[in-house]
Amino acid sequence: MRVILNFVLIYCLSSISFEVLAQTSNPNYDPKLAAKLGADDYGMKSYIFVVLKSGTNNSKDQEMKNKAFVGHLENINRLVDEKKLIVAGPFGKNDNDFRGLFILDVTSISEAELLLQTDPAIEEEYLTAEFYKWYGSAALSEYLESSDKIWKINP
């Protein structure tokens, strides 16, 4: 029994020392960039992940629907300009009725809800939004500068 306990103790201690050795510093670490992006020690931060689903509005008024979705795209652009929206895009056809997603650079669901109250497609109930706290790379916002240089045709 004593041999087994010693073996378990040695195993536990060696596991701990391997974990400590596995944590290394990043030689490319840029403290100014990390601070600017709000990164924690792991290069991560909190966001709000939004899943857009089909709403309850089944109106056949195509003009009203088109107006709401033009406003939806305008709202997306405004939120990008305000640096609140980091990622947006539609889903393909799926069984969950998911229409699109947003990753918002805000820390609370209540702030995210306020931002999306200005979206005509949500306001007119063509879309509904589900909000989730999400933890991801703080560098996500850095792709926005490049993304504006690669599209040929504005949708």
Image: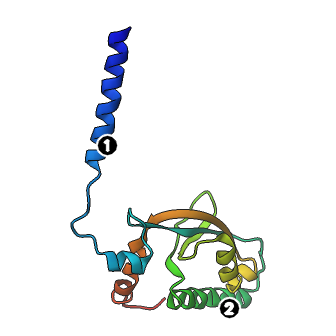
Observer-nearest of 137 and 58? 137
Mark 2 is surrounded, within 10 Å at the Cα level, by few (under 14), some (14 to 19) or many (20 or more) other residues, namely few
Observer-nearest of 8 and 121? 8
The residue that mark 1 highlights is 19
Image height check: is 109 above or below 115?
above
- Under tag 1, what secondary structure? helix
- Residue kind at label 1, given as amino acid type: Glu
- Horizontally, residue 97 falls left or right of residue 141, namely right
Write down the quadrant of residue 78 in the picture: bottom right
The residue drawn where x is 41% and y is 74% is 140
Q: Residue furthest top?
A: 1
- Horizontally, residue 79 falls left or right of residue 61, namely left
Write down the quadrant of residue 55 in the picture: bottom right
The residue that mark 2 highlights is 67
Observer-nearest of 16 and 46? 16
- Residue kind at label 2, given as amino acid type: Lys
Q: Residue furthest left?
A: 27
- Horizontally, residue 8 falls left or right of residue 87, namely left
Of the residues tagged 1 and 2, which is closer to the observer?
Answer: 1
The residue drawn where x is 64% and y is 63% is 97
* CA distance for labels 1 and 2: 56 Å
The residue drawn where x is 65% and y is 82% is 115
Image height check: is 110 above or below 118?
above
Image height check: is 155 above or below 30?
below
Quadrant of the snapshot with the N terminus: top left
Question: Where residue 30 sits: x, y (%)?
Answer: 29, 75
